[in-house]
Amino acid sequence: MTRELLSEEDARILALESGTVRGHTCKVIVLAGERGTGQLRSHLQERLGAAPQLTRRLASGPGPPAWEDDPDFSIERHVVDRGSLDDTGLHRLVCRAMETPLDRDRPLWALELAPLAGERTALVWRIHHALADGMTAMRITREVLLDPAPVGPPRVSPPRPRAVGFRAAAGVPRALGQELGRRARPTPLDRRVGPRRDVAFVDAPLDELRRIGHAAPERATVNDVALSAVSAGLRAWLQELGAPTDGLRAKVPVSLHQPGEPQAANRDSFMCIDLPLDQDEPVARLLAVTRETRASKQRHDAETLHAFFDDLSHMSRSLERHAQHWAMSPRVFTLNVSNVPGPRGPQHVLGAPLLELHSIAEVAHRHALRVAIVSAAGRISFGLCADPEAIDRLDLIAQGITREIEALG
């Protein structure tokens, strides 16, 4: 049986899973029309050749973690019917999906189907982060689930530079100081997370965020507008608690996937942004975010950090582990806010129009809130996942995001 070792990055992500932190992400797809489990299984079975990783499991036995073909793979084990649900039932299903670990004896994904009121169908798809990062998971979704094929290539970040020796990497000290050396303030999000999860979604027209960015005093991207809205949501929640509203930093993943490169589950870096929660005005918040993200991109901090960790892993595994541990510390960032562009134009599944596409990503140790942003079919969705023991009013953050988009519009 063929075995393929996990990359160092994928193995590290796999090792982060624990008794209270899950390792998977989740896509919530809502369709117009009623579709059945048998139809969905047949649809996926015909397309699995486009994503062979979906039929591979973790290899058993000693040695470093590796993938191997699952000789007992069965689509019936991975695609199941949860029966008819109302919107409250769908919310509970998604919360439970984020609380329940994937079975490591099988390929690390699961898809649950639930008919909804109003002749709609919900698909709740979990896929392990070690199997696919945000860009890879979206590519798999397009290839095995959605129709038509995506129009044009996905948007990508600038090319990943080849790793270089430290003495030649003049930008490393500056990038380390900017991204890892500035400390975040302790917040109510900095706590050990438990096993329970709560989720919330905010949905808005993608063109509205583009228009806001174009009309800003300094040209802003959709991601800048989204980060500003998240800042407003956190500000509303912290003010309700009576907690300080400054010193929060967001870790923003940056994809380093390139067209035509060998497929990899995870290929990304990050930048850290000081969220302007101390700013009173929506436009001032947006300007602050825009200026900081622009500066980080101009310095190529994300690419420099990736080269740094790559070099360090070849020089000293022990030093690399210590550096990764520091990079994951709440002293470096408060929460993770990711943004993955989805397919453009109208999309269908089994001939049923796609109405909604949401993404949920797992929280981390001492980071009790995670925000995953995804765009598809003209809409943008903010998916919030939290430990309810740390955030008992996730709706306040969601409402704050909505109000900020309305105020900027």
Image (cartoon, rainbow, N blue to C red):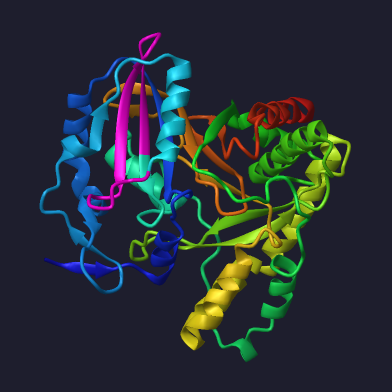
Residue at x 47% of width, y 85% of height: 314
Which quarter of the figure is the C terminus placed in?
top right
Q: Residue 31 sits in which quadrant? A: top left
x then y, percent, for residue 78: 23, 38
* Left or right: where 55 falls relative to 270: left
Instruction: Estimate the x, y position of residue 256 in percent, counting from the top left.
Output: 50, 62
Residue 136 in percent (x, y) is at: 39, 52
> 190 or 12: nearer the eye?
190
Q: Residue at 26% of width from left, 54% of height from top?
A: 53
Which residue appears at 70% of the width and 28% of the height?
396
**Can you say whether 223 is above or below 6 in the image?**
above
Q: Is residue 123 inside the magenta stretch? A: yes
- Could you say which is closer to the camera, residue 86 or residue 148? 86
Viewed as shown, does residue 229 lie left or right of 305? right
x then y, percent, for residue 282: 82, 35
Q: Quadrant of the N terminus?
A: bottom left
- The residue lying furthest to the bottom in this view is 167
The residue segment tinted magenta is 101-125
Q: Is residue 32 above or below residue 237?
A: above
Residue at point 44%, 39% (across, down): 99
Q: Is residue 342 left or right of residue 37?
A: right
Q: Is residue 137 left or right of 174 when viewed as pictured?
A: left
